[in-house]
């Protein structure tokens, strides 16, 4: 049995994936993200983790901790692979970033790795690129498991579909990672997730990050319904303030015609987006997790880009169980 479950984190963001693994007993010893706006937030919570702010393209492999590191986690960008397959992706900067993730796996040969990305990676148009990614990991000696998961099935109060790629080192495992089935529990509603925050005024110092953006609404935003009721789950929390769902107390939107919605034209009606804290609750961050930002758009971006903490924890706990069955020499 492993006494310490030391891992490193790439493209760490605010640390949603890292926090889920921490709750499952893993320790992130080194993290990396070149987005300067996430540094204070990440290091404020993960005080013992060394955080490298350089682009992963600028970090020599020799400077990435490897001693007793058993896992690598992160969400490497896949947009360029999705657009035109592996060949185009290698030349594109975002493709280079994904290749850096692969390079780290090749150098460290961890017992396992976890990569998370957008649902579009599984589309038919991206089949060639996705297959190339899986083959690359397999060629490094890993059993590769992939699955499109909806956070809604795992105790998270939102419809959020994301692809997870989990690799198990064939040197230590005889089988691939099996994704946990959906939890047999009642789905968490917006009322259960953010209902209590109604007792606090927006901008109140009593609640961390209970701030709301007041930017306008684009025609794209107004093409769809953006409100879910209290007894429903949230729409996906995205990384842009302009695409944040509306608070469930808002009046219903009115459909004018196909792809055109509008607000009720009444001075007494109030429409507002979810606050950063409400979005964080929906992403299952704990209430003591403080997002530090200079502009509210940075707060929304950090929350929206994160892996829901409870979903990360579900995956991490399954990996922890599998590791207990092994006695690897590291």
Image (cartoon, rainbow, N blue to C red):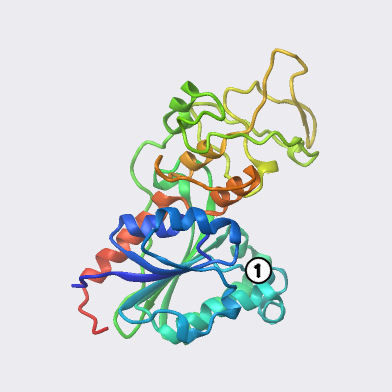
Q: Which residue is mark 1?
A: 126
| Residue beneath the point at 24% across and 84% down | 329
In which quadrant of the rendered view does residue 234 lie?
A: top right
| Residue beneath the point at 58% across and 22% down | 249
x and y, in percent, of residue 260 in the image = 79, 33
Judge by depth and name the residue closer to the eye, 234 or 210: 210
Is residue 253 positioned above or below 274 on the image?
above
Horizontal relation, residue 90 to residue 38: left or right: right
| Residue beneath the point at 22% across and 76% down | 326
Is residue 9 positioned above or below 312 on the image?
below
x and y, in percent, of residue 231 in the image = 48, 27
Q: Quadrant of the N terminus?
A: bottom left
Is residue 136 positioned above or below 15 on the image?
below
Q: Secondary structure at mark 1?
A: helix
Horizontal relation, residue 87 to residue 9: left or right: right
Horizontal relation, residue 266 to residue 66: left or right: right
Is residue 232 at least partly visible in the picture?
A: yes
Q: Residues within 10 Å of mark 1 (few under 14, many from 20)?
A: some
x and y, in percent, of residue 11 in the image = 53, 66
Q: How many marks?
A: 1
Is residue 132 at least partly visible in the picture?
A: no
x and y, in percent, of residue 302 in the image = 56, 51
Judge by depth and name the residue closer to the eye, 232 or 181: 232
Q: Quadrant of the C terminus?
A: bottom left
| Residue beneath the point at 72% across and 69% down | 83
């Amino acid at each position: 049995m492993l006494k310490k479950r030391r891992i490193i984190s790439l493209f760490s963001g605010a640390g949603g994936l890292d926090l889920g693994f921490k709750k499952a007993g893993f320790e992130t010893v080194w993290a990396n993200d070149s987005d300067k706006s996430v540094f204070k937030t990440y290091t404020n919570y993960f005080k013992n983790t060394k955080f490298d702010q350089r682009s992963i393209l600028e970090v020599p492999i020799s400077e990435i901790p490897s001693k007793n590191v058993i896992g690598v986690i992160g969400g490497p960008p896949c947009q360029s692979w999705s657009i035109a397959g592996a060949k185009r992706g290698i030349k594109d900067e975002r493709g280079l970033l994904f290749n850096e993730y692969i390079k780290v796996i090749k150098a460290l040969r961890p017992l396992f790795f976890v990569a998370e990305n957008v649902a579009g990676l599984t589309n038919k148009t991206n089949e060639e690129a996705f297959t190339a990614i899986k083959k690359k990991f397999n060629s490094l000696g890993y059993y590769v498991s992939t699955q499109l998961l909806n956070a809604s099935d795992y105790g998270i109060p939102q419809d959020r579909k994301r692809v997870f790629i989990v690799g198990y080192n064939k040197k230590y495992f005889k089988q691939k990672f099996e994704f946990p089935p959906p939890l047999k529990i009642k789905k968490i509603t917006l009322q259960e997730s953010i209902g209590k925050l109604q007792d606090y005024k927006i901008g109140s110092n009593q609640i961390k990050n209970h701030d709301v953006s007041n930017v306008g609404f684009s025609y794209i935003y107004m093409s769809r319904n953006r409100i879910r009721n209290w007894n429903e789950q949230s729409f996906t929390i995205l990384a842009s303030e302009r695409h944040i769902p509306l608070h469930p107390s808002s009046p219903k939107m009115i459909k004018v015609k196909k792809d055109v919605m509008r607000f009720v034209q009444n001075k007494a009606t109030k429409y507002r987006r979810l606050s950063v804290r409400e979005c964080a609750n929906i992403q299952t961050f704990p209430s003591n997790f403080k997002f530090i930002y200079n502009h509210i758009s940075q707060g929304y971006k950090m929350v929206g880009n994160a892996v829901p903490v409870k979903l990360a924890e579900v995956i991490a706990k399954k990996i922890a169980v599998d590791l207990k069955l092994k006695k690897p020499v590291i």
